[in-house]
Amino acid sequence: MLARGPGQLLGWMSSLSDPTRLRLLHLLEFHELGVAELCEVLQLPQSTVSRHLKVLTDQGWTRHRREGTAHMYRTCAEELESAAGTLWELARRQVEQWATLKQDRVRLMRCLRKRERDPKAFFADAARRWDEMRAELYGQGCTVAALLAMLPAGWTVADLGCGTGWALSYLSPYVGRVIGVDQSPQMLACVASSAMTCFSAEDVSSLDCSW
């Protein structure tokens, strides 16, 4: 497919007219990378890298997705219009032997090796949104249900200071017996589960726990 007009053609050519953008496209053909990784490989400040990535994304050369707090970029060569793909093929053949690109590839391999041996970096970056990310991926109840399912079915579980029995109401389908103990008769009167045995005790430390 040909360019739809001179503006589109000149936009593509302008995108490929900068050495930094050519380096970015060359790297992103090899691997999906985050902005911080691209800064490390290109040895350029984040503001510079982000500015060039915006140009490439606006012109349709790259796509990005959110991963935690990071944006991961890749080329979208398979989505390019044929004329744009032809321009990139021409540019790539002309620049692939540049000494700068060879050094970029060396730093890229070093960066990827570091990523593989340092999974702590991902979790450090994702820490603040970890609960939200897990809920998005697996839902709110997945972890609780999985943990409850691991309880031995014959267990007797007591909650000392059970209040209205909220926690035991989740446990009761998974174990043999649940016992709620609280010093407040009013709290125990609010227990909704008929499967729960309830005791009122002023001092739980003095209880005979041979139930």
Image (cartoon, helix red, strand yellow):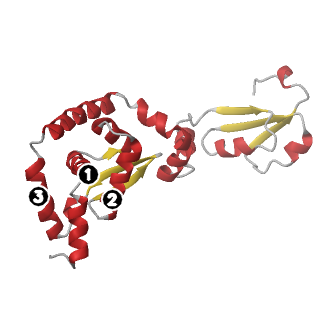
Q: Tell me: 174 left or right of 190.
A: left
Helix, strand or loop at mark 1: helix
**Which part of the image, by quadrant, shows the C terminus?**
top right
Q: Measuring 48% from the left and 33% from the top, which residue is drawn there?
A: 124
Residue lying furthest bottom: 4
Expressed as whole percent of the image width and height from the top left, the position of residue 147 reads 55, 38
Few, some or many C-alpha atoms within 10 Å of disc 2 (few <14, some 14-19, many ≥20)?
some
SS under mark 3: helix
Q: Nearer the viewer, residue 140 or 92?
A: 92
Please give the residue where the numbered disc 2 appears in the rendered image.
55
Image check: 195 left or right of 99? right
Please give the residue where the numbered disc 3 appears in the rendered image. Answer: 89
Q: How many numbered markers are drawn?
A: 3
Local secondary structure at mark 2: helix
Q: Choose the circle earlier in sequence order: 2 or 3.
A: 2
Residue 21, numbered circle: 1
